[in-house]
Amino acid sequence: MSSRTVIRGGLVITASDEIHADVLIEDGRIAALAVPGTQNWTADRTIDATGKYVIPGGVDAHTHMELPFGGTFASDTFETGTRAAAWGGTTTIVDFAVQSVGHSLREGLDAWHAKAEGNCAIDYGFHMIVSDVNQETLKEMDLLVEEGVTSFKQFMAYPGVFYSDDGQILRAMQRSAENGGLIMMHAENGIAIDVLVEQALARGETDPRYHGEVRKALLEAEATHRTIKLAQVAGAPLYVVHVSAMEAVAELARARDEGLNVFGETCPQYLFLSTDNLAEPGFEGAKYVCSTPLRPREHQAKLWQGLRTNDLQVVSTDHCPFCFVGQKELGRGDFSKIPNGLPGVENRMDLLHQAVVDGHITRRRWIEIACATPARMFGMYPKKGTIAPGADADVVIYDPHAEQIVSAETHHMNVDYSAYEGKRLTGRVETVLSRGEPVITEREYTGRAGHGTYTPRSTCQYLN
């Protein structure tokens, strides 16, 4: 069954180019680009993209579907989460499989394969959360890299859950220096934060806003500095996830100026939300509890600057939704019991387009930080992240003039609130193809669970 699709008349935007071109798709891949109207391609399906952008499907390299956390589970399944991702113009996610303490990496990875297989609307890969570094774990890391799980996440936060001490971090980094894997780090000094949490609760400071106050920017910066030095000792590359504080950006910039293979990711919540949200009246602030936490508004300018100067390279969502009713409410009267995480997988591409409209970034930089760089960082380029002959036909027809108001009433994530409720955005996804198959067709869902396939990855393409 051969199939051909032609997309006519759009402005094709990649990380490197903006060109008016017709796009030919054959059997799930980009076959050719041509000057508009010059080719009489025949096709089973023709899409008119006049006045629209034709962009690569987004690559969200940081999601947590069905993650067990804080006595509950993230509310999006792989089925609901990947469908919502598609609605937002994302066609590939890389989710985190979890090793539980006392168990093998393989057990964790197998469990996540079982959750995802046959349920995803779009393609997916896995990182591996390493919670228990020992000799067996280190050997398993080599095997996982060989089979396409090429990145490993560690936590300097959450003592007693995911936490690794400096010795465990160093051992894992040394191993990744040998096997080509990439260590991803949640950089916050969790030991010190736990002291501040205990002291705040003892003072009766129990509201959501204190979550942001105890998880101090200096403790993010300290952990970022420390993990950079550990990576330097190990001779390993490092990717710091969800950078939220200007002081942490400064640590990354310094390391990169020294020529180190250190990379940084931020998320839309840190670019568009702030501690003002955590301080919303009553218990409303609980909706915005995530770690690293939202920061005072003045941090936003430094994050945007970092994205422009390439001291930050990627914007992912850290999508980890918990419903306000029944889940976030677990922390009423004790902010430390509020499940950490925000919904966002559906909003990222639109929010970043708004950043283009607002003048923070260029159109090509939008595609770079949301599509091309995450694909390169995690070994999926040029299969994912661009529109070029041979690439998977993961393509979004994007209307840059359509206006929308973000709301839980209309979003497709399985969560009862929106972190961006009422926000007006310019730009909207119209049609989404995943490997040439229409998942969203002119604002109608035409995809299916099970279309998305597991994507093994090569090693980080910035190190070759």
Image (tube, rainbow, N blue to C red):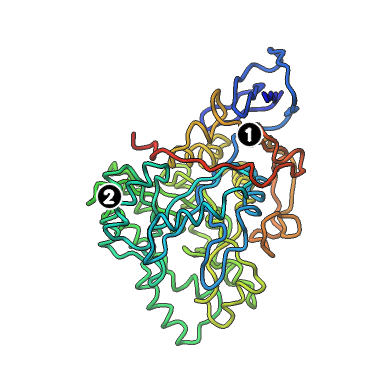
Residue 370 falls in image quadrant: top right
Q: In this view of the protein, which residue sits in the foreground, 72 or 108? A: 108
Residue 359 falls in image quadrant: top right
Q: Is the residue 324 above or below the residue 185 in the image?
A: below
Q: Is the residue 354 above or below the residue 163 in the image?
A: above
- Residue 219 in view, yes or no: no
Helix, strand or loop status at disc 1: strand
Which residue was labeled with disc 1?
Answer: 395
N-term mark: 2 or 1? 2
Horizontally, is 421 left or right of 233 in the view?
right
Which quadrant is the C terminus positioned in? top left
> Picture coordinates of residue 375 (x, y %)?
48, 39
Q: Is the residue 273 above or below the residue 116 in the image?
A: below
Q: CA distance from mark 2 to mark 1?
A: 37 Å
Horizontally, is 20 left or right of 151 in the view?
right
| Residue type, numbered disc 1 | Val
> Picture coordinates of residue 10 (x, y %)?
69, 27
Which quadrant is the N terminus positioned in? top right
| Residue type, numbered disc 2 | Arg
> Picture coordinates of residue 296 (x, y %)?
51, 64
> Picture coordinates of residue 220 (x, y %)?
39, 62
- Nearer the observer: mark 2 or 1; the answer is 2
Q: Specify the label residue 175 is tagged with.
A: 2
How many numbered marks, from 0 up?
A: 2
Neighbor class of circle 1 (other Cα within 10 Å; few <14, some 14-19, many 20+) is: many
Q: Residue at x 48, y 45 (%)?
A: 314
Residue 137 falls in image quadrant: bottom left
- Residue 424 in view, yes or no: yes
Horizontally, is 321 left or right of 257 in the view?
right
Q: In this view of the protein, which residue sits in the foreground, 77 or 233? A: 77
Helix, strand or loop status at disc 2: helix
Q: Residue at x 61, y 20 (%)?
A: 33
